Amino acid sequence: MPGSQQVAQVDKLLTNISNKIVPEGYISEQILPLVNVVQSTGLIGAYGTSHLRIETTLTGGKNKYPRVDTRTYSTQQYNIAEHGLSDIITRADYANVESPFDAEADTTDELVTKLWLGKEKGLADSLTSTSVLTQNTTLSGTDQYSDYSASDPLGDFATARLTIQAAVGMMPDTAIMSWAVFDKIRTHPDFLVNLGYNYHKPGGLTLGELASAMGVKRVLVGSAVYETAKEGQTSSIDAVWGKHIIFAVAPTAAKKRQISLGYRFQQFGAPRKVYKNVLGNPPGAKEILVGDAYEQLLSSVKAGYLIKNAIA
């Protein structure tokens, strides 16, 4: 009879599924070689360029060897900054938050995400600023690599490599870009033809193949995203690494007598340490804290080259 069908009166919250945007593809801690430090501030030693100067070396017989000035030293300071965020989980939160949600785990996860995104965005903003990387070019219109017929990425990349080599005596070993840029240029005809694939690579180039085409040892693709809207406004998600490409001399390990775009100074061991403190006020509450202490120092900006707005 009509109306006899049983209908659930309350929508039950499923316990084994939930939706959440979880950033992935962080690369900030892969770009600059790591230096673990104990103290919050210190000095990096640097050599001058007097050893590169061509001298008169001709001698013979009883003539003395020409005496020259060799060692030229200088220093650059690093300053560790502490970063941290916290939130409180109340007794009511523990009682009222039900599966698939988890008040403590979710709070910890989101604090870690916020802290890590801040670190990622901080380095991305520096490396994509023309006032920081003063060796740069800004593309527009048909010069952007979205235009497969008119753009010249191979020529631009050659300019980037040669500019760095002329400034620091080394070719760049690393290229940095967002997923959007990688996804666009891996099917650019210039690269496919250059590597002999032409139309026989419908899926585009792999990271290794793209690195070969760009003349570097590695390509780092950052795919982390962040919320650009203010609290209460309509959500707007954007890529942390934008639409740019950075070439850099960025060795994978820090050592003496080397050139590097910069260094990541990390204090107190591993990044993003989590602390959980039981609070007496309010009763039954717990405070979750996530801390990090670091500096991402760009010590040799001439070891980098920025291609701004590489795609439309």
Image: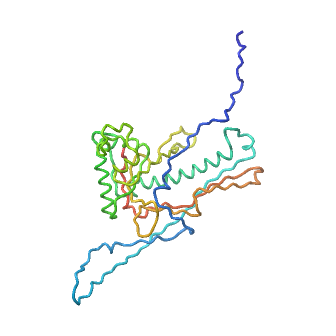
Residue 5 screen position, x and y as percent: 71, 15
Give the number of callouts: 0
Residue 19 screen position, x and y as percent: 59, 37
Looking at the image, the residue that sits furthest to the top is 1
Camera-side residue: 270 or 145? 270
- Which residue is at a point 39% across and 61% down the rendered structure image? 301
Looking at the image, the residue that sits furthest to the bottom is 62
Relative vertical location of residue 167 with respect to residue 54 in this rendering, above or below: above
Residue 201 screen position, x and y as percent: 35, 39
Q: Is residue 4 left or right of residue 152?
A: right
Picture quadrant of residue 136: bottom left
Relative vertical location of residue 18 with respect to residue 191 in this rendering, above or below: above
Q: Is residue 204 left or right of residue 88?
A: left
- Which residue is at a point 34% across and 64% down the rendered structure image? 168
Residue 147 screen position, x and y as percent: 31, 39
| Quarter of the image with the C terminus in it | top left
- Which residue is at a point 64% across and 45% down the rendered structure image? 106
Q: What is the image's colouring? A: rainbow
Q: Is residue 81 left or right of residue 312?
A: right
Camera-side residue: 283 or 169? 169
Camera-side residue: 252 or 281? 252
| Quarter of the image with the N terminus in it | top right
